[in-house]
Image (cartoon, grey):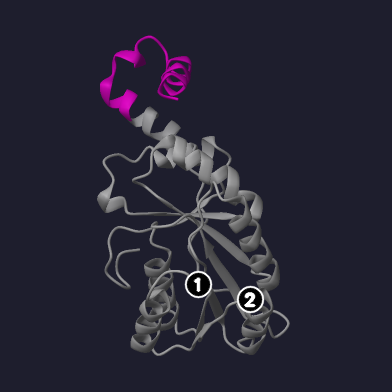
Amino acid sequence: YAEKLLKQLCMSLTGQQLTDRKMLRSELRKLVAARIRTDRAEPARPRRGGRAQVISLIGPTGVGKTTTIAKLAANYKLREGKTVGLITIDTYRIAAVDQLRTYADIIEVPLHAVLTAGELHQAVESMRDLDVVLIDTAGRSQNNRLRLSQLKSFIAAAEPDEVHLVVSATANRACTVAVLERFVPLGANRIIVTKLDEAGSFGIFLNVPAAGGGPISYVTTGQDVPEDI
């Protein structure tokens, strides 16, 4: 990938320009930036047809989905003044519901924990009068096709407006590519990159578009809620 960038850089500059370190750095920065697609962060859209904006977070285990969804909920409510609801289907991890419930209590938003796709659909409908409904899902291994199939049925039941795939900046390229290959077909149309504060490098921002991932919607830089996003 670096070789491709350098080749393009050399082809875009003249011989004299190639001796100018400042220009080389500036032009290389532009080439890198052009490859990083972003989904501009905007306030939640107005409701359409009396239905809340439904946003689901999916991804592998341990990438920080629950903490990230708490940050989003807090920012939507406290900074944008939206009415917010939380739903979790992460009933597999011990105390996962309790973790999200703690956040929900602090920012004073309703939380529903559901077990089935049918219950999820009902929970979304019960919150249709809110501005934003955020759905936290259980982490799934990209290698477990059965669990991924189950997750797909949950997504279909929720009919979300946005599905954000959460990936960790600490993951290596092969792992990131595998995650994208398995989760994007489930309906993921945006990417959240977490744990920038723990990463040794930021190659993931080039690996994601190279592997066919969607635009970057958010990045997170720590565990503090709601600041580190």
* Distance Cα–Cα, label 2 vs label 1: 30 Å
Q: Nearer the viewer, residue 150 or 41?
A: 150
- Dot 1, crowdedness within 10 Å: few (<14), some or many (≥20)? few
The answer to whether residue 89 is left or right of residue 159 is left
Q: Nearer the viewer, residue 117 or 180?
A: 117
Residue occupying image coordinates x 49% and y 84%: 82
Q: Amino acid type of disc 1? A: Pro
188 w.r.t. 82: above or below? above
Residue stretch rendered in magenta on the structure: 1-25
Residue 175 position by quadrant: top left
Residue occupying image coordinates x 57% and y 87%: 130
Q: Earlier in the sequence, mark 2 or mark 1?
A: 1
Residue occupying image coordinates x 60% and y 87%: 127
Q: Which residue is mark 1?
A: 43
SS for callout 2? loop
SS for callout 1? loop
Q: Nearer the viewer, residue 166 or 31?
A: 166
202 w.r.t. 167: above or below? above
